[in-house]
Image (cartoon, helix red, strand yellow):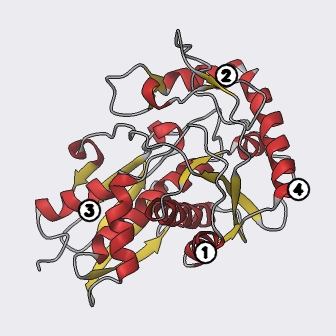
Amino acid sequence: MPHPFATHVGIRRLVTAAIAAPSVHNTQPWRFRCEDARVLELHADEDRRLPVLDPRGRALHISCGAALLNLRLAIRVTGYRPLVQPIPDASRRPTLLASVRALRAPGPSLTDAELYAAIPLRHTSRRPFSERPVPQEVRRELVAAARAEGVTLSLPGPQATAYLLSLVAAADQELAADPGYLAELARWTCDGGRADGVPAYAFGPRPSGRGVPVRDFGLARPLPGREVDHFAARPQLGVLMTRGDEPEDWLRAGQALQRVLLTATRRGVSASPMTQPLDMRDRRPGVPRTAGHIQAIIRLGYGPPVPGSPRRPFPEVLERA
């Protein structure tokens, strides 16, 4: 098999897998650059950063980390292994988040092959989940998926879940009252016809405010006749934590997040982020950090199939030297 960076078809296959990753508000804040047939670079697209919601760029790095995990899996199934250098030249090339080389290796493990196959099937679900609990064996697998990327996934019990949901609800209310947040949300939601942002068909029902406090993407773009739901089922939450809170930690968290989400997809588990408290934390630089930095809160459970959000065309995200 030819080197995965050697042909246009090979690069297209890799980048197409990478850009199927989730991103904050579906901003898709990444660019790829092929320096030569040996190195593929992942860059942050600062024009797609959310200055109100993500002033530190943490969510941008997590989004790009998710794309990097997809890229790694796509390389593995070609019979090569990725060699990743994260944040290789922060002072001179601040947008360069990772340089990736590919070295010959034995074929992928069954797990990696199945995770790669799950990439096009993984979609964020903003629909209500059923009361069915996530089985213990699946929970263990999700924890192991995060651990494989050097990140901790905590699965809190009922009391801690109730506390976390109260934090999410308070942060959600505060964001909903912020004109700057609503204006930014309006820029990244749409009725359709765009290759980025969250389309109306992916909003899900409008939360009634009496159940799980999911983010309402329709706040800035009200839709007539939109369904309302209480989101009454208490979900299983997953909390991703890193030891540090720097760009390299955020990039690692994004890779762990995507490995967890793909593992959930393999097991038929639906997922969506509930990161409103983290958004508020990022907007307040004076808020003290805790030991074990929370990078993502994930709602896990069983919901109906949902369509994917659009993606930018391959030529828009790839630059050639």
Mark 3 / mark 1, whichever is N-terminal: 3
Badges 1 and 4: C-beta atoms under 8 Å apart?
A: no
Q: Marks 1/4: CA distance?
A: 21 Å
Coordinates of residue 13 in the picture (x, y in percent): 21, 60
**152 over 121 or under it: above or below:** below
> Which residue is label 4 attached to?
159
Q: Earlier in the sequence, mark 2 or mark 4?
A: 4
Q: Nearer the viewer, mark 2 or mark 4?
A: 4
Tell me the crowding category of disc 3: few under 14, some 14 to 19, or many 20 or more residues within 10 angstroms, Cα based: many
The dot on residue 137 is 1
Determine whether the residue tagged by mark 3 lies in a helix, strand or loop: helix
Three-letter code for the amino acid on which mark 4 is drawn: Gln
Image coordinates for residue 194, horizontal then vertical, percent: 34, 27
Label 4 secondary element = helix
Badge 1 amino acid: Glu
Query: Do the numbered discs 3 and 4 sit on residues whose CB atoms are within 8 Å?
Result: no
Nearest to the observer: residue 121 or residue 277 = 121
Q: Nearer the viewer, mark 3 or mark 4?
A: 4
- Front label number (2 vs 3): 3
**Under tag 1, what secondary structure?**
helix
Indicate which disc residue 14 carries. 3
> Which residue has dot 2 on it?
180
Chain-order first, disc 3 or disc 4:
3
